[in-house]
Amino acid sequence: DAKKVVDLEASGDTPSWAWWDDDSLDFPKWCSFKLNRAQRSKAGFVTVTTSACAAASGRSRHALDRSRLGAVVIQALCEANFEGHVGVSFEGVSLHDKSGHVHVHLKCYDNVLITAPRSIPQASKRGSHRKVTDSIDEFITRQQKFASRLRRSANNGDRNHQKRYLTVHSVPSLESSNDPEVFELFCHYQTVVHKDSDPFFGEIGGPETSHSDEYARTKEMCPSPGFLDVDAVYCDLSEDRRNVIKKVYLKFYRFLCETPVKQDKDRGSFELTDGYDIHIPNGTFHQHYRLSTTKDGVDGPIIAVSVIDLLPQCLSSVYSFYDPILSSRLELGKYTALREIEYVIRRRASIS
């Protein structure tokens, strides 16, 4: 409702617009309009911007085209009735093709104070914890729905609305490669961040997408249980869809799971010390970042994975992938890098 988005709140002789952190508005915060800085306009023009189209496109895994969505929003704004809003007139609207941001151009008069997000710091601080909590609940719900669409046997349970702990456990790459949740998170990251084709919901090409023979040969050569059985895990999907998934899985396996680094399984321990498994043996590992219900648990959904080569004298950070939407709140890319640095410091201290 375009008229609702730009609702004007009168406050004495100096009305103001709260574009952010306004609990009275019942639409998501990422649908709001905002200014880059606070302005007091005297018969001047200001521009307010929303990234809702780009955000909606990303949240839909690009099922919604942001340019087409932007065109619909522009049409709705142009047809909206802005009469009756004291001190402001609607001058026009435009769409930035590259970013998908919608810009609304307004003319404001002497008695209008335009308030930007940074001018409401108290509201932001009060709502900061709630926002992170809501983001975690949103991720868990979204992850459950996604798993149910692909795997009917997925055990979702009632896992949201619980206290969560961010736990990290190292898993040998040839064991992690057999975890559907890890592979699905990788595909989601590659689709949103690197614009790869979505193997689960994207278009299915011609016969060239079939990699069943190559997949079968690779599976025979791989040590058990280090290779995901796509046909068994995604048995509810069509054969053509499974062939597309097999093609992407082969890339995932060869990129992040196959390793020349040998692991000495008879040495080391996977027990946690203050949340760090610093006594694990050398080898290639996937560090699973989970939202668990206990401090040392492994019962929560995976939100990020770091791929590392652990060698006698160093740790090599190979790659990391994570949920892009949740990362907008938790900065998961930065966190995984910082935690790897802390891991090296602690491991070195334990050896010396």
Image (spheres, rainbow, N blue to C red):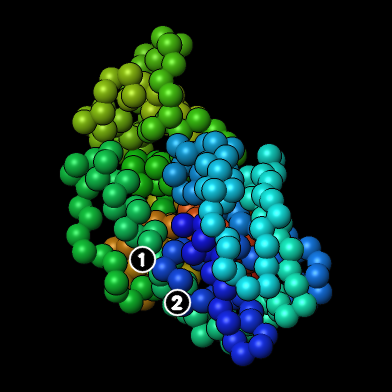
Query: Would residue 175 appear left or right of 312 to someone viewing this image?
Result: left
**Residue 250 shows in the view:** yes
Q: Residue at x 26, y 23 (%)?
A: 238
Q: Residue at x 69, y 51 (%)?
A: 92
Q: Is residue 337 above or below residue 152?
A: below
Quick one: SS at disc 2? loop
* Picture quadrant of residue 17: bottom right
Q: Residue at x 46, y 57 (%)?
A: 1
Residue 273 coordinates in the image, percent (x, y): 45, 75
Sequence order check, earlier mark of 1 and 2: 2
**Label 2 sits on residue:** 24
Closest to the camera, between mark 1 and mark 2, is 2
* Picture quadrant of residue 20: bottom right
Q: Is residue 127 above or below residue 76?
A: below
Residue 85 coordinates in the image, percent (x, y): 59, 69
Question: Mark 2, residues whose alpha carbon is within 10 Å: few (<14), some, or many (≥20)?
Answer: few
Q: Is residue 177 above or below residue 196?
A: below
* Picture quadrant of residue 139: bottom left
- Residue found at the far front of this picture: 84
**Label 1 sits on residue:** 137
Query: Would residue 102 appear left or right of 151 to someone viewing this image?
Result: right
Looking at numbered disc 2 in the image, what kind of residue is underneath it? Answer: Ser
Between 266 and 7, the one lying in front of the other is: 7
Looking at numbered disc 1 in the image, what kind of residue is underneath it? Answer: Asp
- Residue found at the far top of this picture: 207
